[in-house]
Amino acid sequence: MIVAMQPLEFEKPVAELEAELVRLRHKAASQDIDMSGEISAMEAKLAETRTRIYQNLTPWQRVQIARHTQRPFMLDYVNLAFTDFCELHGDRRIGDDASMPGGFARIGGRRVVVVGHQKGRNTKENLKRNFGSAHPEGYRKALRLMKLAEKFGLPVISLIDTPGAFPGIGAEERNIAEAIAHNLREMMTLRVPFVTVVLGEGGSGGALGIGVADRILMLENAYYSVISPEGCAAILWKHRKHAPEAAEAMKLAVPDILKLGLIDDVVPEPVGGAHHDHQATADALRDVVTRHLDELCALSSDELLERRYAKFRAYGEWREG
């Protein structure tokens, strides 16, 4: 699936070269003239520019890619990387949360339960999906599905893509903090393999609420952080314009997160980001996830619990002066 691009600011040199290449090819075809030399030179320049830009992305540029509206979302991956998806609804207390879909599916021929955050690409979709920010009933539904997976002995896969849990009055009244805290405790004791993938934004407790897993994976241009760069900048610098500096300081992008040992593997993206080729990214996600599932499914439930406990106990370090 190739998507018509809406270039980000730093991508404009690439977009301009792509447009020029299209013009050269059209001119050669419409006027029946040989412009192979010019076309080859333009293709080489385009490839060099792409490589230079995308191999030297700043943390803030990765955040921008992670938020790209044409980036594949949770249900896109379910359609492209999974099969036989059967969505389940409701938390059995309040209602259904469309920002946290989930259900039974297959990946790599293996039956699983998949749950995750879903964003929208336009105003109507975003209102339905609440911009990917789940309510308490979304987290309670996610836990219900995880418990269902445990009952039937199925692995759990969670797909994270949220700026954070919904902070509105209604969510507070229905106890969003308790819903997330309850999930944290219960995910630690699930007796089935659990893999989570940060697809785009991995924001705060909203991400962690479905992310206490045996293996934590991230797409190459995703980010994982306790707060957004804009929120950090507003606190430390008193202005959102310092978001690029905050992103650099927070170590929220894949290269830094990997060095810190907070994730287990990286899902590669096509050059320029997942929004340039949905299918290729979904194929890469399926390959990486199934590889980790194969390793986890070979372990007993007791081994899973011991390793999961040790994994999260090892997070963080300190130095005594």
Image (spheres, rainbow, N blue to C red):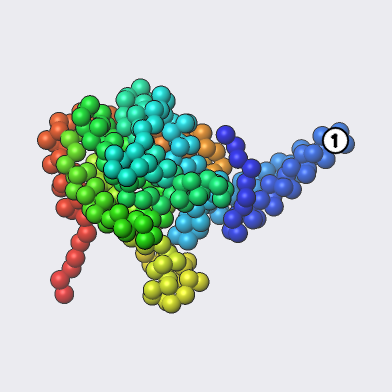
The answer to whether 251 appears left or right of 131 in the picture is: left
Q: Quadrant of the N terminus?
A: top right
- Compared to residue 50, the image places residue 304 above or below, namely above
Q: Is residue 40 left or right of residue 51?
A: right
What quarter of the picture does the C terminus occupy?
bottom left
- Residue at x-position 15% and y-position 71%: 320
Report the label total: 1
Q: Is residue 306 left or right of residue 288?
A: left
- Near mark 1 (Cα within 10 A), the count class, few <14, some 14-19 or many ≥20, is few
Residue at figure coordinates x 47%, y 31% from the top left: 79
Counting from the top left corner in percent of width and height, residue 284 is at 43, 35
Q: Which residue is at 46% across, 46% downward?
A: 129
Seen from this angle, which residue lies furthest top? 109
User: Measured from the top left, where is residue 180 in percent x and y?
Assistant: 27, 52
In depth, the one of 311 and 32 nearer the eye is: 311
The image position of residue 62, as x and y in percent, is: 47, 55
Q: Residue at x 36, y 51 (%)?
A: 135
Q: Is residue 66 something one can see in this rendering? A: no
**Label 1: which secondary element:** helix
Relative depth, front residue between 114 and 46: 114
Q: Residue furthest right?
A: 31
The image quadrant of residue 293 is top left
Amino acid type, label 1: Ser
Q: Is residue 156 above or below residue 169?
A: above
- Give the residue pinned by disc 1: 30
Q: Is residue 256 left or right of residue 35?
A: left
